Every structure is written in C-alpha cells, then in structure tokens.
Amino acid sequence: MKLQHYLGGLEGLDPISLETRVFVEAWEERIFGIHTAMMALSRQLDLEATPSTFNTEWTWADLRKGAEAMNPFDYFKFRYYEKWLGGISGYFVAKGYITQAELDARTEAFLSSPAAMPEGGDAAVDARVRKYLMIGDDPRRERSAPARFVAGAVVRVANPKSVDHTRLPGHLRNKVGIIDSVYPDAYTYLCDTGVDGIGTAMPVYCVKFDPEDLWPGNTETNFTFYADLFEAYLEPATAS
C-alpha cells in the first residue's frame, strides 16, 4: 500500500474514528452493490450469462489501486465510500464505458433531481451476483515447488519498488523476522503487481517480529507482532 493507504505504525494520527456501522448513509449500500456486481460480472467462474454490457475485469485490487492513486490530500478529505465512488467512476471512464463529460452531466442531473435516479435491476444479473457471492474467489492454488523457507528461519523483509500497488506493509520493509509457520499450498493475488513481485501463486508465511525492532523505544512489553507475507517479499537475513 502507498503511504496514504497504509498508515500502520505511524503516530500522531488522532482522532481515530470509532464508527462501527458498515454503512452510515443509504447511498453507501448502493456503491457497495455496484462494486460487488462488477466483480461478479467480470469473473469467469462458470456463471450464467447476462445481458450486461460490462465486459472487462474488476477486482478488489482495482478498487484499491483507484484509492491509492488519489491525491493524498483528497484521500484524507473524502469518506470511505466516496473513495470507492471515485475509483469506480474513474475506471468506467478509463475503460470507455462513459466519457468524463457524460459522467459530469449525469451527476449534475441527479444532484438537481434525485428522484430521477434509476431504480430496479435485472433478474439475471442479480442471480449471477448471488451465485458469485456463494462461490467467491479462492486465492489458494496447488503448490508446484517446495517453499523456500521453513519454520524457524530468520528472514529479512525486502524493499521492492512499488509503482502501482503493493501488499507489503511499509513499516516492515528491511526488517528482520522469524518464520513462525508456512501456510499449506500456494496463494495468488487479484492482480499482478509488476516490479513489486506478486503475480503467479507462491508460498505465504506467517512471520513474527520483535516490536522493539519495528518501533525502537516505543513499544509495550511481552507481545509479538505477526504478519502474513508473500514469499516474494522475503529473503534470507544474511543477504546483503
């Protein structure tokens, strides 16, 4: 994650919102529904055909990349589902489903006359979404080669260049930890992260860290920090 999208380990970020409701306003439910429908319509999981014209791929990774690409000042200004809306809207424009001018015109029309907002849906699309929610996307794959590390091995977290998206927490880069366990099989991600190193399925490890190594002089005692990390993010601790 880029800085504005992953703030673990940073101080001075108060106040922290304790809001526990999943949806604070009704429009947020619609945004979540649009995102879910986009995933269901783009995934090839032996699902029924629908009359939808949506024919490109959309995943959680696309949603995350859209949020991470925002100007950091805008990122902190907008609410959670406003970031989703921006990412989804930008995707539709980028893929040619709608032009920015058309999007602006429709937005203005709906803001001036909320009653004009379309309602209802398509039964075939609804059925496909429900089936997709039951099937889901399993990231687990059969492992084709042995895991590089074993439990107890001392490893150093890499510091790869991340241009578009990364699954590596910033505060773990270059830190040394110990393999606590090796998860069975291999695991993939929703998209290829390019130079970041995540693409084909690979082993995933639970790595434990001494908090004092992560935040020197600013930790509580008697606890251990654990993180699940792809193999591409790890190297032997003796490596230069």
Image (cartoon, helix red, strand yellow):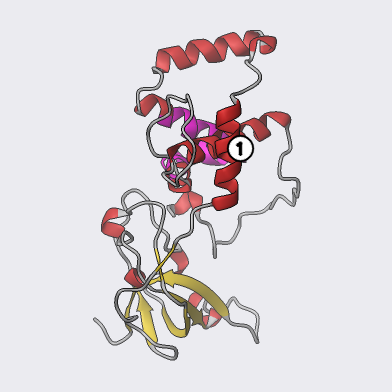
x, y percentage for residue 166?
A: 39, 56
Whether residue 125 is visible: yes
Query: Foreground: 143 or 25?
Result: 143
Query: Foreground: 123 or 104?
Result: 123
x, y percentage for residue 143?
A: 35, 73
Quarter holding the N terminus is bottom left
Q: Which residue is mark 1?
A: 32
The answer to whether residue 86 is magenta is: yes
* Residue 9 left/right relative to 23: left
Residue 78, by quadrant, is top right
In the displayed structure, 44 sits above or below 181; it is above
| Residue type at the position of mark 1 | Phe
* Residue 53 left/right relative to 222: left
In the displayed structure, 228 sits above or below 28; it is below
Residue range of the region highlighted in magenta in the rendering = 65-91
Q: Residue at x 34, y 80 (%)?
A: 147
x, y percentage for residue 209?
A: 50, 81
Query: Foreground: 118 or 51?
Result: 51
x, y percentage for residue 107?
A: 55, 15
* Residue 163 left/right relative to 113: left
Element class at badge 1: helix
Residue 139, by quadrant, is bottom left
In the displayed structure, 101 sits above or below 84; it is above
Q: Residue at x 49, y 37 (%)?
A: 48
Q: Residue at x 60, y 50 (%)?
A: 134
Residue 81, by quadrant, is top right
Query: Foreground: 113 or 131?
Result: 131
Q: Residue at x 42, y 63 (%)?
A: 168
In the displayed structure, 219 sits above or below 95; it is below
Q: Residues within 10 Å of mark 1 (few under 14, many from 20)?
A: some
Whether residue 73 is visible: no
Q: Main secondary structure of the magenta part?
A: helix
